[in-house]
Image (tube, rainbow, N blue to C red):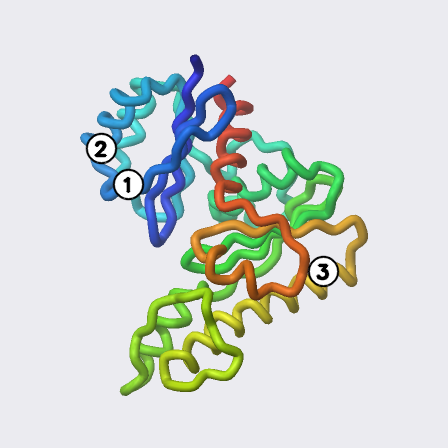
């Protein structure tokens, strides 16, 4: 049985999805990126292939461990993908954005896709029906907004993200939540509306850790998939690790 480990190292979390028979069996959060932790995964799941998407300065020694035990691929601008990147500096495109675009092309190949990834930052990734990733936007994520209001003021507290947010805040904490959560939701709806006016046959995909907090507050119809980046990584692995 073919097993593939798909690693997603973001600014907030390091995660890995285990694929068996082309389906996700489980998703794990890694406490550390040590060689011991990776060897433990290899021993448990016996993978034949692996792929790494990283936007951080991770422990590079794990790449040697994965390459020795599996067919390993590190996602970069040199990776073979099913779309083009007609931008000025393709080497500057984040690995996570490439993976999201790969998923959009695989599952919605005839659509103009806007993929919104909600991590430490919110990325808006537009890939058209001609399979061209032409760019998008990047803005502060939900946790970053909440932390900024605390760190750059003298008295505002740090509040935790929540999906149960009132439109009209009734104390300091709910005022902060209303501004951050509903403000970000309105931002996302605004981007979606502008893209929808510009493009026909238009599709919106939403993924990322803050999906649980934001999804219910969006007015626009979306396809929500918390595992979208892993599905994109698996599709890329199949091309680059034949």
Q: Tell me, yes or no, whether the two marked residues, 3 and 1, touch with CB atoms within 8 Å.
A: no
From the top left corner, tell me how far across and down residue 153 is, in percent: 32, 84
Give the percent coordinates (x, y) of residue 97.
52, 47
Q: Are marks 1 and 2 in contact (CB under 8 Å)?
A: yes
The residue that mark 2 highlights is: 37
Quick one: label 1, few (<14), some, or many (20+) residues within 10 Å? some
Q: Is residue 239 above or below residue 115?
A: above
Label 1 to label 2: alpha-carbon separation: 8 Å
- Residue at image location 35% in from the left, 41% down from the top: 15
Q: Residue furthest top?
A: 1
Tell me the residue at 39%/47% (across/down).
55
Q: Secondary structure at mark 1?
A: strand
- Sooner in the amino-acid sequence: mark 3 or mark 2: 2
Which label sits on residue 187? Answer: none
Residue denoted by label 1: 30
Q: Quadrant of the N terminus?
A: top left
Sequence-first disc among 3 and 1? 1
Tell me: 188 left or right of 178.
right
Q: Position of residue 9 (x, y in %)?
A: 36, 43
Q: Are marks 3 and 2 in contact (CB under 8 Å)?
A: no
Question: Is residue 88 visible to us here?
Answer: no
As measured in the structure, the alpha-carbon distance from the residue carrying label 3 to the one carrying label 2 is 42 Å
- Tell me the residue that label 3 is attached to: 195
Residue 25, by quadrant, is top left
Q: Mark 3 and mark 1: span between their CA atoms?
A: 36 Å
**SS for callout 3:** helix
Q: Position of residue 132 (x, y in %)?
A: 68, 43
Q: Residue at image x 72%, y 65%?
A: 194
Q: Residues within 10 Å of mark 2 (few under 14, many from 20)?
A: some
């Amino acid at each position: 049985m073919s097993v593939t480990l798909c690693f997603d190292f973001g600014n907030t979390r390091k995660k890995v999805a285990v694929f068996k028979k082309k389906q996700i069996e489980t998703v794990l959060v890694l406490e550390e990126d040590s060689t011991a932790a990776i060897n433990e995964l290899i021993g448990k799941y016996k993978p034949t292939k692996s792929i790494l998407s990283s936007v951080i300065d991770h422990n590079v020694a794990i790449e040697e461990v994965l390459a020795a035990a599996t067919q390993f691929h590190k996602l970069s601008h040199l990776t073979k993908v099913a779309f083009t990147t007609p931008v000025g500096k393709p080497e500057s495109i984040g690995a996570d954005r490439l993976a999201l675009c790969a998923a959009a092309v695989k599952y919605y190949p005839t659509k103009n896709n806007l993929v919104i990834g909600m991590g430490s930052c919110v990325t808006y990734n537009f890939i058209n029906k001609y399979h061209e990733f032409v760019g998008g936007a990047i803005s502060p994520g939900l946790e970053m907004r909440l932390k900024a209001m605390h760190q750059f003021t003298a008295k505002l507290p740090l509040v935790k993200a929540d999906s149960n947010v009132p439109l009209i805040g009734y104390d300091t904490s709910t005022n902060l939540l209303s501004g951050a959560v509903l403000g970000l939701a309105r931002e996302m709806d605004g981007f979606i509306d502008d893209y929808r006016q510009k493009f026909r046959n238009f599709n919106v995909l939403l993924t990322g850790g803050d999906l649980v907090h934001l999804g219910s507050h969006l007015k626009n119809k979306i396809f929500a998939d918390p595992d979208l980046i892993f599905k994109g990584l698996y599709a890329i692995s199949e091309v680059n690790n034949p």
